[in-house]
Amino acid sequence: MVLFRTNLKFCVIGCLFALHLFSLSNLFAKPVGVYPNPIPVNGTFNLPPAILFVPFPSAACINAAAIPSTDTMTALQLAYSPSRGEEPQNIYSGIATSTKTLGVGFGYFGSLGNLKTTNGGFAGFGFKNNLSQYGFSYKTSDVSSSNQSSFDVSYLYTDTREALSYGGVLRSLNNSPQLNLGLGYIPSRFFNIEFNVNTPKASQLSQGDFILIAASNFSISEQITVHLQTNFHTQTSKIDFLFASNYWLSDVASGIIQFTAPNIWSLGFSVIF
């Protein structure tokens, strides 16, 4: 088992290094970098998400400080995850609008099943001051239960001249706080990589599970962008994987396919106005 983990670690590092080299090529024409990247890694269907280079339409659900974008724009995202046996099917929608200094976003996510149906949502606001961005958000996974709500505050710093980004999200201020921290590297507009640490809730800190996240966005053609993510749980040594890809139908619209281990598929669509 130790040998497997060691080999896996070197394999992941090698793959990411190779992707970095490829990203320096002029063949890659679709920006990812700090630009809005509407891949639905929002944690609605699957893993705890990476927090720095987040999909613009669902930024309010992940890190509201990321809503102010490099351009004035509005983006909409829709996604669906079909049922697996007795498990419910999931529906997600998010929309955000932003100037270079201010942004707001909101959305809906729900689970539809035979045994239980839940309806949740989120809303957030972010603003930018020089290279620093700040955000405030509210979300609930079930509107019928007050115990499922969360007030979050977030911070993001990005300096493309130094190819650096870092930030954090303090979640559940109204309940048991939980901290997410991230450090990112942006060597080009076509490639980024980040490393996150998700702490357990404050009430479970002594016996809780820390989650270490490595994630990357990169282009492989003018039409295809890809997101790769690995989550490692320190308490159980469990490793989760996520793969997502956008196929850009035009400069403003893309189709999305996402796979999360062990066997969760999601399909989606995004459009930028």
Image (spheres, helix red, strand yellow):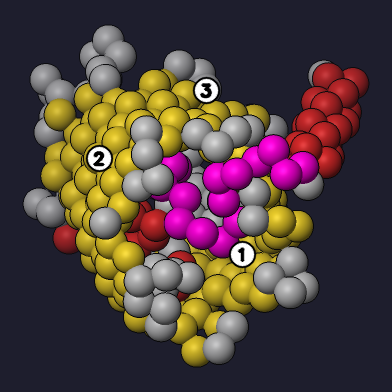
Residue beneath the point at 39% across and 57% down: 56
Q: State the image coordinates of residue 190 (x, y, percent, origin top left).
A: 64, 49
N-terminal-most mark, 1 or 3: 1
Residue beneath the point at 50% across and 34% down: 223
Q: Quadrant of residue 74?
A: bottom left
Q: State the image coordinates of residue 128 (x, y, percent, origin top left).
A: 46, 83
Q: Quadrant of residue 28?
A: top right
Residue 215 in sight: no
> Between marks 1 and 3, how big is the CA–CA gap?
24 Å
Q: Kindly identify which residue carries mark 2.
A: 78
Q: From the viewer's side, name the closer residue of 30 and 173.
A: 30
Q: Kindly identify which residue carries mark 1.
A: 181
Residue type indicated by callout 1: Leu
Q: From the viewer's side, name the closer residue of 214 and 15.
A: 15
Q: Give left or right: position of 124 versus 246.
A: left
Whether label 1 touches label 3, CB < 8 Å: no
N-terminal-most mark, 2 or 1: 2
